[in-house]
Amino acid sequence: QQQVKQSPQSLIVQKGGISIINCAYENTAFDYFPWYQQFPGKGPALLIAIRPDVSEKKEGRFTISFNKSAKQFSLHIMDSQPGDSATYFCAAVQGYKLSFGAGTTVTVRA
Amino acid sequence: ETGVTQTPRHLVMGMTNKKSLKCEQHLGHNAMYWYKQSAKKPLELMFVYSLEERVENNSVPSRFSPECPNSSHLFLHLHTLQPEDSALYLCASSQSFSPGANVLTFGAGSRLTVL
């Protein structure tokens, strides 16, 4: 059973545009919600993360919005750049277990 | 060497072969993980070791056998695999399982093809 559902599967955005990726979860015991970025030929790398007692976290052009009551969280990439083209995974953490979404492939067109 | 290093990066094996994947972390972390990554699917947790003790075996077939000789090294021994086992196998490490702080550092992965 997939514990974290991620959408869309892929998206294309123009340079300078906004990319939005959404995730939903069911288990209220999750205590940490990271996003990982993966480039071809590389392993996933932590991009940004949020704890459930915070509704928003911003780091540069990347923002996580977290809605605890709806059990949903999203990643916003502002002013998207060609270098942001990658696959993005949301995850939810309980102890040592990370449950990942299926990933979103983002393509930024110049 | 820094971070998490995986070897080999690519491996092709027949169904009757025996091979091993190796992972080494240079971060001083206490926990190490094996994940399986298949196209369009979520990363699947296979095994977790904390301080060299296995704490998770996520219903993985016995043809996959992990080994953690010390906190810096992790192996995945492979034998009599099936073509559906072809995937990217990712090793990761983390410092802590503390709530709100479990951050994984991944290696680049070993791309396995089973013929």
Image (spheres, coloured by chain):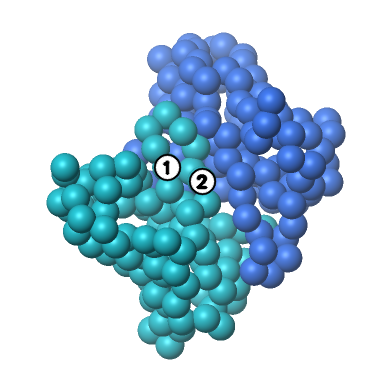
| Left or right position of A89 against B33 | left
For disc 2, the marked residue is A45
**Quadrant of the snapshot with the N terminus of chain B:** top right
Q: Which chain is blue?
A: B
x, y (%) of residue A54? 52, 81
Q: Which chain is cyan?
A: A
**Quadrant of the snapshot with the C terminus of chain B:** top left
Secondary structure type for disc 2: strand
* Residue found 23% across the figure and 45% down from its top: A107
x, y (%) of residue B60? 59, 41
Secondary structure type for disc 1: strand
- Please indicate, yes or no, whether residue B40 appears anywhere in the rendered image: no
* Residue found 56% across the figure and 47% down from its top: B45
The residue marked by circle 1 belongs to what chain?
Answer: A
Marks 2/1 in contact by CB < 8 Å: the verdict is yes
The amino acid on which the numbered mark 2 sits, given as a three-letter code, is: Ala
x, y (%) of residue A53? 56, 83
Question: How would you rate the neighbour count of disc 1 (Cα within 10 Å): few for under 14, some for 14-19, many for 20 or more?
Answer: many
For disc 1, the marked residue is A38
The amino acid on which the numbered mark 1 sits, given as a three-letter code, is: Gln
Considering only vertical position in the picture, is A56 above or below A102? below
* Residue found 66% across the figure and 59% down from its top: B102
